[in-house]
Image (tube, rainbow, N blue to C red):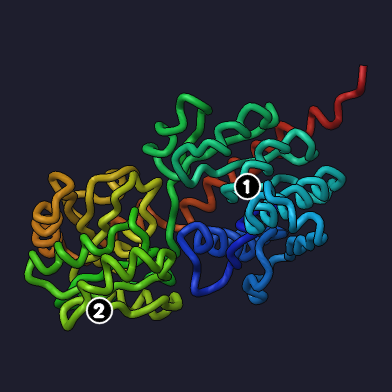
Amino acid sequence: MRICIIASSQFPIREPFAGGLEAFTHTVARRLITRGHSVTLFAAGGSDPDLGAQMLIPERLEFTEAARSDVGAMPVDWMQQHHAYLGLMLHLAGSDEFDVIHNNSLHHLPLALSSMVPAPVLTTLHTPPTPWLESAMNYASPSSVFMAVSSATAQAWQETVSAGVIANGVDTEVWKVGPGGPGCVWTGRLVAEKAPHLAIDAARAAGRSITLAGPIMDRAYFDAQVAPRLGDDAVYAGHLHHAELVELVGSAEVAVVSSQWDEPYGLVAAEAMSCGTPVAAFARGGLVEIVTEETGALAADGSVASLAAAITRAATCERRVVRERAEQHLSLDRMVTEYENVYAQMAEEISPRQAAPVR
């Protein structure tokens, strides 16, 4: 099939990934290409040239001096994203080169303008509802299809839209089984809602060291809450490439997920499980659908003490069983096959309407 994937216009689809959404997009695009599909990716400049996808790079927005002096102007970054997605949708409106469009962006325009494009649009709901996306739902094409990354996310959207569920998956060939080790690991964006500072506190309370890895997206939070807690038993390893992350996660005893918001899915938990590393997490959002008693432990409440107890329980899980769970239920191949089935159904449903004579 000829598939257009709409990704972030802000963050390049390349390692080290800015977050799970960028990693998801890269992985899905690569697997679709290996399965023989033609993939065109709309993404920020600097995206991985070795991915193999055709690229649609957004034009940079250049303002006149008069526009820059407007005191009521929106922030430049906001305007750049608006410009990028508006240009994309106008391009797609005049194009018949795609069988299906898979919208993985968090922007409202691909959804709001979906009626303009001839190809059917599938939107994956990667987050709980936001005001911009909710408002765009009012203008979405009647043929639009929605898939959520977890049952928890689908439920969060149920007052606005009915969405199916295709749970995220990880490449179990990349996220290989590791030997485990004596300490904990925490991975992800270092921001307040992910609360890595609580992971440090919980690991210490459980008598274990911890290594953190990921991009610092909120410097003020990092300086105030994370940096003061670092020491011999709590180390920040930086923003790592995939191979380094796989080695780090696979060599840990327990992966800690300390999110203070309802995780739409919990990709870092699935990645850890693919490495055979059990997970200790707060019971938020999609994490309750990933972490089982055989593969980790969920904290009884939102306290550090409960997360520390979960770390201790998770450490007793058998790594072989954790890995098997990932292979059977959390794999990339399972996820991509489910998306392929939806693509085919959408293309089949749109074709009769396109071929129908005008009366």
Q: Quadrant of residue 34?
A: bottom right
Q: Secondary structure at mark 1?
A: strand
Direction from residue 14 to residue 322 in the image, left or right = left
In the displayed structure, 223 sits above or below 20; it is below
Q: Which dot marks residue 235?
A: 2
Q: Amino acid at mark 2?
A: Val
Residue 252 picture location, percent across and down: 22, 74
| For the residues bearing labels 1 and 2, Cβ distance under 8 angstroms | no
CA distance for labels 1 and 2: 37 Å
The quadrant in which the C terminus is found is top right
Provide the residue designation for mark 1: 103
Residue 65 picture location, percent across and down: 80, 61
Identify the residue at horizontal 70%, vertical 30% (top origin): 141
Identify the residue at horizontal 25%, vertical 77% (top origin): 251
In the displayed structure, 18 sits above or below 130; it is below
Query: In this orientation, does residue 130 appear?
Result: yes
In the displayed structure, 195 sits above or below 73; it is below
Judge the density around disc 1: few (<14), some (14-19), many (≥20) Cα neighbours within 10 Å: many
If you read the primary sequence from the N terminus, does the residue marked by circle 1 or circle 2 appear first?
1
Judge the density around disc 2: few (<14), some (14-19), many (≥20) Cα neighbours within 10 Å: some
Identify the residue at horizontal 64%, vertical 70% (top origin): 47
Residue 45 picture location, percent across and down: 68, 69
